[in-house]
Amino acid sequence: MEILTDPWSWWIEPFADNVSMQRALYAGLLAVLSTSVVGTWVVLRGMSFLGDALAHGVLPGIAIAFIVGANTTVGALIAAAVMVVGISVVRTHSPLPDDTSIGLLFVGMLALAVVVLSADSSSYTGDLNRFLFGSITGIDRGDLWRQGIAALVAVAGSVLLHRAFLVLTFDEVYAEVLGFRPRLTHLALLALVTVSIVASFETVGSLLVFAFLIAPPAAAALVVRRVPLIMTVAVALGAVAVVVGLLVSFHHDTAAGATMALVSVAIFTISFIWSAVRNALAGRRARAVAPA
Amino acid sequence: MNPPSPSVAAESVSVSFGSRPALESLTFELARGSSTALVGPNGSGKTTLLRLLAGLIGPTSGSVSVTIDRPAFVVQRTNRRAWMPLTAREVLRMGRYASRGLVRRLDQHDHEVVEAAAARLDVADVVDRQFGELSGGQQQRVLVAQALAHDSDLLLLDEPITGLDIPSQDRILEIVAEETARGATVVMSTHHLEEAQRCSTVLLLATRLIAVGTPSEVLTADHLTAAYGDRVLSVADSSTPVVLDEHAHGH
């Protein structure tokens, strides 16, 4: 158990002189910052499926941009815009429930990405893998800059629009009464979700982006009960997932993106068990104090 | 003495959703400082009229003039996320966003307005609890306090007491009386004819306007039959007819 007996070589050494591990750490932490803050609203507003669809739906944009040699970030943003417009068109012009329109766009975009990348005699299969699972060990300065700016946009947007998001999540009609333009607010939230997804995408992959969008905020929402606190705790839990995930991946040679995603879901599981036990104990105490 | 200028004036107002008429050619005025009960069966346009007065929708034809800026509107308690992490105090503070907007800080005055509103609705002792964990009556009193925190002179309430415990009902109806006494205009929809009788004006709706006036002028057997059809019972030894009501609906 090196993790306990020799903490230096398990926890610290992998980062000490290893530039690619350091960059992976920074990229992961920046991804956590933007996704956890924005993801808190995704969880509270109950739009996880939309978040998932967006995280995977940007793939064809990246794939096409990659093949034609264009900027993949721009490709991803265009694909996200197509998703959002497509979902709202199906929603307003058909009686189908929301998750159906989201699911259709989701699977359509994912299939398109696979078809595009497999068309040219499968020479891009490795790239599809990279987009899905990320290549966190191959991060350059440009990636870090992009993620830093995205984190800044996500955090600044969440602070400036805090009241709008809070009231929107509480009651859309009341948001209208206050003059907060609920539809525009919803679009602004989707824009922030898109920014944090797209910026982190190529480095950490769509699987990890989605895990970070949902798991840390969900874990935090079970243990604290104020929105700013949930965001703070979510960022902290996400950071733990990044560090632990990277180290497990380093020591055991597992896929970095998937390992971090797995650790973040494991953290959610621990938080879930902890809150369930706490609620059960509180219930028992309440019954003991106030006999019926 | 001139009569007080109306705070709401509607002139042949109609609202349709697609091809479905929700309100047909309503003409009425509501005086400043009056309390008005909107009465009528489900689907008669009560909520639509409140949304119209709140400025959330516009008329399809005709005109409506509301001379009071930024009315406060308590919507029906149905579409909120009960588990959302939010204290009652945070819900009350939203009322101040009406004048503070998206980013301006709440100052001492805002906090005083919020505390005063909480005290008036008897919820001062629960403001630090999670909103979703309060009882239905407490939640509704918090929402009425939230509307008071708007500090508006037009208070719109959509079925504010339906399904509540008696103390909560009483407190909210007392607030309506207090608000009109200080000169505010109150409009509320209701299924309770008794509650309507405590208002200065009753507006009886069945998509079109059946009658508007004082409770005794409007709540007659003939008018109620026109609005509710055969669900009206005339009780021999009472001057007030009884409506077989379908409240406690869940939309």
Image: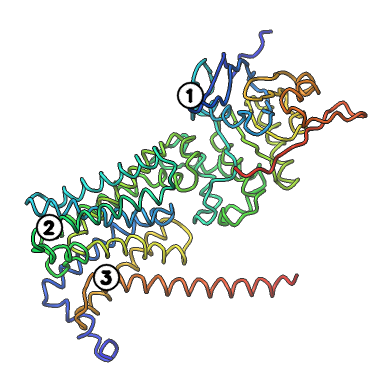
Q: Is residue A68 above or below residue B37?
A: below
Q: Residues within 10 Å of mark 3 (few under 14, many from 20)?
A: many
Distance from disc 3 to disc 2, alpha carbons, whole Å, reads 35 Å
Residue that mark 2 sits on? A119
Q: Is residue B73 left or right of residue A101?
A: right
**Quadrant of res B12:** top right
Chain assignment, label 1: B
Quadrant that contains the C terminus of chain A: bottom right
x and y percent of residue A19 in the render?
11, 72
Q: Earlier in the sequence, mark 3 or mark 2?
A: 2
Q: Which circle, 3 or 1, is nearer the viewer?
A: 1
Residue that mark 1 sits on? B58
Q: Which circle, 3 or 2, is nearer the viewer?
A: 2
Residue that mark 3 sits on? A242
Please name the amino acid that badge 2 sits on.
Answer: Ala
Point 20% across, 45% down: residue:
A78
x and y percent of residue A287 in the render?
68, 72
Q: Is residue A69 left or right of residue B176?
A: left
Q: Are marks 3 and 2 on the same chain?
A: yes
SS for tag 3?
A: helix
In front of the other: B126 or A202: A202
Please name the amino acid that badge 1 sits on.
Answer: Gly
Q: Is residue A55 above or below residue A13?
A: above
Please name the amino acid that badge 3 sits on.
Answer: Val
x and y percent of residue A277 in the render?
53, 75
In front of the other: A71 or A220: A71
In front of the other: B208 or B62: B208
